[in-house]
């Protein structure tokens, strides 16, 4: 058993053992007391539902059942915490009546808060419902000026978007003060945890609830404490949402390792290249498994400590960071063992870690851009459901990142690889004449230093003009390994890609297909939304990006294989057919690439196998 396998097994064992870790005692006490609440006033319902959402799905389900058997006031209170479709549907007619009965200035403040929340929901989900928006603005305006500054009012400051913090702290209870302090200082609460005032209020409330008190006051205290503990024990909420959280990792991990899974199980033969590909694929799969195991493991371990909220982000970062570092380490050892890297392991690792840092920084930037787009699109298209807006955001980001990535990628490769121009004047002259036949200058061709590696390859990237670059590995300039005409054949192949604008066609073809499929799903989702088929709409729109990307990916792979044959044919027409065959065989040998792959695996590959390309070149040669 290899070292990476041992790490994965140990992580699994730790995950199993971590199941014995119980939740923090303050959270357990809070949940137990919330279960004992039997009052039906709005704040009692809000308190139980809030604690249920955060720490106890069972309590949430119990509260929902009580609400379904209760009054419209209880239903509206529950909807203040959770926009539950079942509750809204059950009390649809009664809520409608309640809204029409409201009279500003006469209806009690707490009832106005509940109605305002329902009006906010309607306005957000139906842009044409101007009546709800107008009435909401009237109620909010009155609440700001005249609303009773009680616990429910403070709880609703963010929920119904009351644009005021004009609350006199002198008349508030400890629970109201704690709640107001938390929701009025979101940056502090989110990043560095509770401040000194909040900790003092928490201690006072904890001392209060040890004594007998009316259930209404107890409900306020428990609700306020739930906000406080959600800051200090954020892993509690993640624990109950671990399945849905894991789905965030499922797609990226699947995209990373599915080709490796395919390669591992379809690889045939016992040659050196087949053994290498199988071991390399195994490392990728083990890395993905390690990331999947570390996420729930870190959540379980986080229950042992009181954390400030910013620390919880490490739960999302570490499962990606550690497996990435272990993958670089294990794959470097593999490359070294198979003779693909000649320099010291330490030097090669350092260069790869530098690349990883740049990739991580770029990924962080892309994540921030994605969040910015998603949040602002949600604000812009607030009348649409979150899933429809998410699909639109995916569509926009797909176009933006594809075009931006194509423009930035050549420069990124130059920086990370420290590529330079061809030094040999004689070779530069031969390549210059070859490049001019395709209308390009030799400055577009860059050499990637081998850094002691035997890896050999060449690729073209970039969009238009000077942004277009062709990169060749330094190994291919070694006359002992590649003849000049073999190098020229490979460059003719890459220049044909440039001349025929294959990269641009590939990217925009991919975008057109993906965006068309997403657009169809969004339109279908909107139609289902109009038809009030919410469950089907959510399923359709949530799956749209993944189905679109899958269809676009398979189609794009087919296009790229066709483009590879076209570029091979162009090189053959220039008299490089035999040289290209020889060069391709050497590249496969240097990279330990199998000569043939299964027909099924070919569907997911951008390049056909060597045998197919050799047959195509033989056919082209016979034509000339």
Image (tube, rainbow, N blue to C red):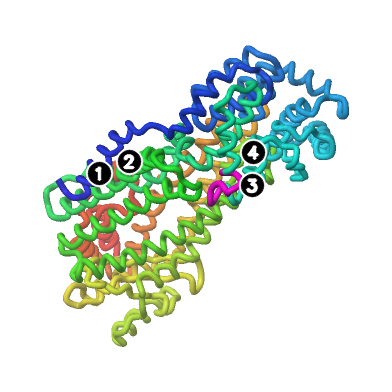
Residue that numbered label 2 is attached to: 293
Sequence-wise first label, 1 or 3: 1
Judge whether 439 appears above or below 399 on screen.
below
Element type where label 4 sits in the image: helix
Q: Which mark is residue 377?
A: 3
Q: Where are the magenta residues, as a range? A: 190-199
Say which residue appears at 52% left-offset and 59% top-offset: 403
Residue that numbered label 1 is attached to: 8
* Distance of label 1 from label 3 (alpha carbons): 40 Å
Give the main secondary structure, helix, strand or loop, of the magenta stretch: helix
Q: Kindly check if marks 2 and 1 are in contact, taking CB atoms under 8 A apart as contact.
A: yes
* Distance of label 4 from label 3 (alpha carbons): 30 Å
Give the mark toward the camera: 4 or 1. Answer: 4
Q: Is residue 169 left or right of residue 358?
A: right
Q: Is residue 585 visible?
A: yes
Quick one: label 4, few (<14), some, or many (20+) residues within 10 Å?
many
């Amino acid at each position: 058993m290899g070292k990476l396998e041992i790490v994965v097994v140990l992580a699994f064992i730790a995950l199993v053992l971590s199941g014995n870790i119980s939740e923090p005692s303050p959270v357990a006490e809070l949940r137990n007391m919330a279960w004992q609440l039997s009052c039906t006033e709005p704040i009692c319902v809000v308190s139980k539902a809030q604690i249920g959402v955060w720490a106890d799905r069972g309590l949430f389900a119990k509260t929902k059942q009580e609400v379904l058997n209760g009054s419209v006031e209880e239903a509206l209170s529950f909807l203040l915490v959770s926009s539950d479709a079942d509750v809204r549907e059950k009390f649809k007619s009664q809520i409608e009546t309640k809204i029409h009965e409201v009279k500003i200035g006469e209806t009690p403040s707490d009832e106005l808060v509940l109605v305002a929340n329902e009006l906010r929901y309607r306005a957000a989900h139906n842009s044409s419902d101007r009546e709800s928006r107008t009435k909401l603005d009237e109620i909010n305006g009155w609440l700001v000026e005249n609303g009773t500054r009680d616990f429910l009012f403070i709880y609703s400051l963010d929920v119904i978007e009351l644009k005021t913090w004009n609350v006199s702290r002198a008349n508030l209870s400890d629970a109201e003060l704690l709640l107001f302090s938390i929701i009025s200082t979101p940056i502090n609460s989110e990043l560095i945890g509770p401040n000194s005032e909040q900790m003092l209020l928490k201690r006072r409330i904890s001392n209060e609830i040890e004594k007998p008190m009316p259930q209404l006051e107890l409900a306020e205290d428990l609700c306020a404490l739930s906000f406080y503990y959600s800051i200090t024990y954020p892993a509690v909420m993640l624990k109950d949402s671990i399945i849905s959280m894991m789905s965030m990792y499922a797609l990226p991990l699947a995209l990373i390792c599915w080709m490796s899974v395919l390669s591992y199980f379809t690889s045939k033969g016992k040659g050196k290249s087949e053994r290498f590909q199988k071991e390399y694929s195994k490392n990728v799969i083990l890395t993905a498994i390690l990331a999947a195991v570390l996420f729930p493991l870190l959540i379980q371990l986080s229950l042992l400590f009181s954390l400030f909220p910013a620390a919880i982000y490490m739960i999302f970062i570490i499962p990606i960071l550690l497996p990435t570092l272990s993958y670089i380490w294990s794959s470097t050892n593999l490359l070294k063992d198979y003779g693909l890297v000649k320099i010291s392991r330490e030097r090669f690792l350092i260069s790869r870690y530098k690349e990883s840092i740049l990739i991580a920084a770029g990924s962080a930037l892309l994540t921030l851009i994605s969040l910015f787009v998603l949040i602002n699109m949600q604000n812009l298209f607030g009348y649409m459901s979150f899933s429809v807006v998410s699909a639109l955001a995916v569509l926009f980001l797909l176009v933006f990142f594809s075009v931006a990535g194509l423009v930035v990628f050549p420069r990124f490769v130059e920086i990370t690889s420290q590529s330079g121009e061809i030094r040999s004047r004689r070779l530069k002259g031969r390549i210059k004449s070859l490049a001019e036949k395709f209308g390009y200058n030799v400055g577009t061709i860059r050499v990637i230093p081998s850094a002691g590696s035997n890896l050999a390859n060449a690729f073209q990237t970039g969009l238009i003009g000077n942004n277009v670059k062709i990169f060749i590995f330094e190994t291919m300039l070694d006359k002992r390994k590649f003849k000049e005409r073999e190098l020229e054949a490979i460059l003719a192949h890459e220049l044909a890609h440039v001349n025929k604008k294959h990269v641009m066609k590939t990217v925009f073809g991919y975008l057109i297909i993906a965006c068309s499929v997403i657009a169809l799903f969004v339109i279908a989702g909107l139609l289902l939304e109009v038809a009030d088929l919410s469950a089907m709409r959510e399923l359709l729109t949530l799956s749209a990006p993944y189905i679109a990307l899958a269809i676009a990916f398979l189609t794009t792979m087919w296009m790229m294989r066709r483009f590879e044959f076209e570029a091979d044919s162009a090189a053959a027409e220039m008299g490089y057919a035999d040289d290209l065959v020889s060069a391709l065989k050497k590249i496969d040998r240097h990279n330990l690439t199998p000569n043939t792959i299964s027909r099924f695996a070919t569907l997911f590959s951008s390049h056909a196998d060597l045998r197919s390309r050799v047959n195509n070149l033989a056919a082209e040669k016979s034509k000339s």
